Image (cartoon, grey):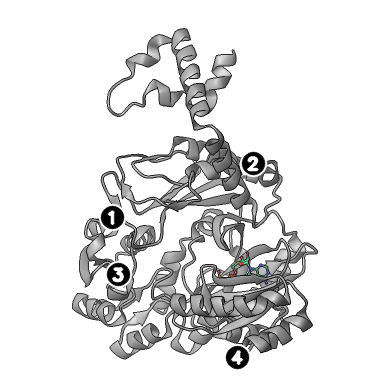
Amino acid sequence: MFHKVLIANRGEIAVRIIRACRDLDVVPAVVYSEADRASLHVRLADEAYLLGPALSSESYLNIGRVIDAAKSAGADAIHPGYGFLSENADFATACAEAGIVLIGPPVESFGLTSDKSQARVFARGLDIPIVPGTCAPLTSSEEAVREARSLGYPVLLKAVAGGGGKGVRLVQSESGMQAAYEIAGSETRSAFGDASLYLEKYIAEPHHIEVQVLADHIGNAICLGERECSLQRRNQKMLEESPSPFLDETLRRTMGDAALRVVRSSGCTGAVTVEFLVDAERHFYFLDMNARLEVGHPVTEAVTGLDLVCEQLRIASGAPLTLSQERVPVRGWALGCRICAEDPDHALAPSPGVIRSLREPQGPGVRLDSGIYRGWEVALHYDSMLTKLTTFGNDRAMAIARMHRALGEYRIAGIKTNLPIFAEVLSTPEFLAGDIRVGLFEEVQRRFEKTRAVSPSLFKAHALAAALAYADATDSLFHAQDEEKESSWKLSGRPGFLAAFRR
Ligand code: ADP
């Protein structure tokens, strides 16, 4: 096993990796930007190295500075987490040149994980269905028009170097192609430094389902089931669950086999995810693959009992897998919500600020991966995701009930978060029935915003009336006034309050 690992990331994922290092008796060293001096990952690590100013290009995306930090630390490996440099081929090369192990795919396989058109060609070569569309990067808007004509509208323009839902643009008809091509190209260049685009047929109401695989250096690979990631906002996953309520056993096995075939043939090792779209008729199509830790990995950990980060570290240090496919212990159900500093009353715009008070959910079946603490300031420089809340139960109903409980306990004050949207989503008949659509999260958010915008004063009046009526019945509430206790007015929003009042 490694002696010291440099964690080239920040926030909840850096904290998550520090914990795995501790469990394996590996020394965790981290990097940070000037904006992150007081961040939780810096406080929890054994060593911390300043990279530079807040701007990502000056800090977390700066290959030279990260490599220098790893050398100063004497780290034998770098864990890049997700995002930032985790899929950057130049970074992988720099690590190899510096003699430092990168916990990720081998340099030779990088193209397959960072270039979607290469990945499509590769999957097609294995006879795995891909979303109909082009493979080679488009060279002009005229070519895009020609290809779209033969595919049939609507189509999606997508970034070859895409990731995180960025660089995906819907084109409904030929008249919109030229403008869409130009806008998508320039967006993609600024996001990924590469303007290459390709085309995919638009699949209506798709399910985004990804299969988690672990693979070692001697050809063993096991499948750890799937994550249903169809609840999205702007093509970014907001809630994950495992298993997917949409798959039956036959399709689960077929997709699992396809994923294993892709991973084995690619030469990728460690934690590898193969992403698929599944259409309404349950045809599945390969989307892409990632040989890095996925944001949604805790739901897989919950249903398998495995620690994926420890597995990554073991595999990267050369150890073989000890678990065979037959012994993968998949059981129960898990849900994971991505809690972000976003204002639910204003189209989920980023909501920076100081966290004034914090009450974190606990109890059976609840896990919190957090990068925050009370008094810490959420800055605008980075992704708005603060924590990941995961719940587990013997079945889906229990995982949902526990998520409701956990969301109800969770209080983050001082900034706005998307917590209330999750509570609403989990109450919709569609979600409860397992009928998860890509657009559901945004629909609920718009409804939420509209209801609150129609009459904020009416909401306040209801809360006031409820609190007064309740206080009248039990005036004990008015005695709970010390700092940590919430005011009676706030308590009027408790889920159980109205029920108690009705009695
Ligand atoms: P990224 O790698 O940037 O996350 P993906 O290819 O994984 O991009 O796609 C992100 C999301 O965009 C998908 O989960 C899905 O909601 C939507 N999407 C992508 N391709 C298609 C498609 N061909 N048809 C319909 N929706 C799609």
Viewer-side label of 3, 1: 3
Query: How far apart are the alpha carbons under marks 3 and 1?
Result: 19 Å
Question: Which element type, helix, strand or loop, lies under badge 3?
Answer: loop
Q: Residue at x 39, y 76 (%)?
A: 85
Q: Residue at x 72, y 56 (%)?
A: 246
Of the residues under marks 3 and 1, which one precedes in the sequence? 1
The answer to whether the residues at label 2 and label 1 have Cβ atoms under 8 Å apart is no
- Kind of residue indicated by mark 4: Thr
Of the residues under marks 4 and 2, which one precedes in the sequence? 4
Viewer-side label of 4, 1: 4
Viewer-side label of 4, 2: 4
The circle on residue 40 is: 1
Residue neighbourhood size for the residue with mark 3, other residues' Cα within 10 Å, grouped as few (<14), some (14–19), many (≥20): some
Q: Residue at x 31, y 56 (%)?
A: 379
Residue 154 seen in the figure:
yes
Residue 263 placement (x, y as % from top left): 58, 79
Q: Residue at x 67, y 74 (%)?
A: 176
- Kind of residue indicated by mark 1: Leu
- Kind of residue indicated by mark 2: Ala
Residue 58 placement (x, y as % from top left): 27, 74
Residue holding disc 3: 55
Of the residues under marks 4 and 3, which one precedes in the sequence? 3
Quick check: 110 left or right of 231?
left
